[in-house]
Image (spheres, helix red, strand yellow):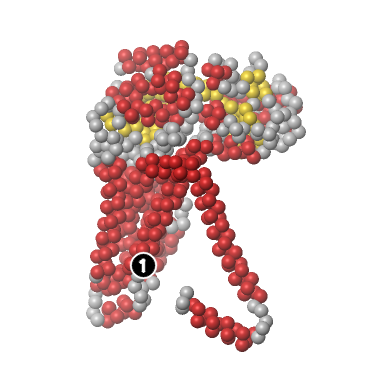
Amino acid sequence: MRTVSRRGSAIAGLAAVSIAAAACAGSGGGGDEGQAGSITISGSSTVEPISSFVAEIFNETNPNVQISVDGPGTGDGFQLFCNGEIDISDASRPIADEEIKACEKNGVEYTELEVALDGVTVMTSPGNSAVTCLDDGDIYALFGPESDGIDTWAGATSLAMEVGGNGGFPDAPLEITAPGEESGTYDTFIELSGIEDIGVDRGLSEDAAAALRKDYQASPNDNVIITAMEGSPSALGFVGFAFAEEAADSIREIQIDGGSGCVGPSAETIADGSYPLSRPLYIYVNSKAAARPEIAAYVDYYTSDEALKTLVPQVGYVALPADRVEATRSAWASATATS
Amino acid sequence: MSAIAPTRHVQTTVELALRGRRRDVAGRVFQGGLLLSLLLSLAILIVLLGTSLSDAWPVLSSRAGAFVTSNVSRLDVRAGVRQGIVGSMILIGFVAIVAMPLGIAAAIYLQEYARDTRINRLLTTNIRNLAGVPSIVYGILGLVVFVQALRAVTGPNVFGRSYVSGGLTLSALVLPIVILITMEALRAVPRSIREAAYGVGATQWEVVRHHVLPYAAPGIFTGAILSLARAFGETAPLLLVGAVTGYLSTPGGRTPLEILQGQYTSLPTQIFSWSRLAGDGWKANTAAAIIVLLVIILVVNLAAILLRNRYDRRW
């Protein structure tokens, strides 16, 4: 009898812990400044750091707005966005045709805003000094859909020459680690490096050409890719520019020749467009949501100089040049004017 | 230990008398093998703990206090695990309230009341299997049932991605474990206790209430708290049912219901998302969060041991 009542008190104790925790969760913030309401953001894991950081600073002046930012991937983001489940979709590529159709079907209207620039850094091990620059043909021969089974650098030479590359690769094992096909970086790399164009020229179907080789080590975790670069002197891979910059000691960047000489990735070459593998990053704002004051205030702040010019570089991305900042701001202004 | 010593003495004496001075080689090898297994598992644990601690040191030595009281941040020097700790606490509180009573009740029924029919045996076997199902499968269950089908109840404003969904998913995950451990504890209560109680005319309810449950309590407790620790460490199902992995703000002034129906993050999912970020700062943060998680689980396990000792009965 006594024992049983003690057990009851222990369960009550557990319940008390959870209630205390709940009370604790509710005790942040306070005060009546700024906007209230909630903002739900999802989409590209590449853009997530920017949206998160902007949200964090926005929350400092608007502590009563509840914001959540996730980064499952651009495609997943648009799926949620076109179902009307999120207010803002982060994207590392423009919205695709079938996604536009899905949005139309559900009556979701939106505004596309360019918010930053990012690049794709092709990299190798710091111990590899034989390869310093790759052109389109080289990349096609090393990464492209026809390179399945090529397991040494030298083995890719003949294919590289065939498609107009420089070739001249060292005779060393070729160990590729890179993002998998669920990643926006994967799509960007294929598109910007010209793999798709070369493949189609060589008679592959569009789907077959818009893919990398199947036999490389794919990882959704960029830290794993960086570690692979450190692990072998003949490693090869690519990650987003911001990530590669953070890990600059562990890797060696490879320059890219897009037809006008070898250019390495840097904030300058990405901003002026001379680095071939650079891309804009976007946010898509649901028009219905944009009518809500907290969303409008958040996007107002997102498109301010402070966010686009100061916060963006702080999380490792390249700020838009002045004219594109203006373009973003006027796109947002006209979207809010009509709604 | 004291119970073993005299027996061992007897054992050696008898062995000496029977076998003379011949050495028991196989026995020694076996003993050495056992010791090696123990050392190996300990070594793995120590290496794991050591690397985490040394990775986490920059954070633990400079801002341990701020680390556990700060919210998520995009800046590694500002980021903390407060929301993760709070989130995980609420989640396991939810599990304690939902899964514990349900699981213990189900186990009492199966062990004390249910007849040994084919259907009941099938039921027990099924529960045993469910306990071995990978946690990601429970994540899929949670996504389909709690997040999508029941979103009007679980989280009307967040499309079902709420504490309620996460808590119910974790509850479903630990339920079979709670049932099995409780059944085990009930089975360990000697028959004689039940028979004695029946012998003096107690009803089945009185037997369970006054005799079986009090004796099984330490076992049930240990099991319950160990399954809470399991729920605390789960990551995969929470990622599926929508724990926030990026940024999350938790403004004040919300009612408990609004909090429960709102979005959340948890310590393990924070560790997961931080491990994917670039730079040494995040590496240190990830390791520090792992240490925090380990400390909390250690405390939970310690509580389990204390509770068990407190309720321990001898017969």
Q: Residue furthest bottom?
A: B17
Image coords of residue B270 (percent x, y): 43, 41
From the image, which quarter does the C terminus of chain A lie in? top left
SS assignment at label 1 = helix
Q: Is residue B275 visible?
A: no
Three-letter amino acid code at the position of disc 1: Asn
Image coords of residue A56 (percent x, y): 37, 30
Q: In the rendered view, does B164 fall on the left or right side of B234?
A: left
Q: In the rendered view, does A219 fall on the left or right side of A59?
A: right
Residue occupying image coordinates x 63% and y 19%: A263
Q: Looking at the rendering, which quadrant does residue B22 occupy?
A: bottom right
Q: Nearer the viewer, residue B277 or B97?
A: B277
Image coords of residue A28 (percent x, y): 29, 38
In the rendered image of this protein, does residue B151 appear above or below residue B112? above
Residue occupying image coordinates x 31% and y 33%: A66
On the image, numbered disc 1 is attached to which residue? B309
Q: Is residue B206 visible?
A: yes
Q: Looking at the rendering, which quadrant does residue B71 occupy?
A: top left
From the image, which quarter does the N terminus of chain A lie in? bottom left
Q: Residues within 10 Å of mark 1 (few under 14, many from 20)?
A: few
Q: Residue furthest front?
A: B62
Chain letter for mark 1, please. B
In the rendered image of this protein, does residue A132 appear above or below residue B47? above
Image coords of residue B209 (percent x, y): 26, 69
Residue occupying image coordinates x 65% and y 86%: B20
In the rendered image of this protein, does residue B164 appear above or below residue A167? below
> What count of labels does the image hold?
1
Q: Nearer the viewer, residue B174 or A16?
A: A16
Residue occupying image coordinates x 24% and y 32%: A31
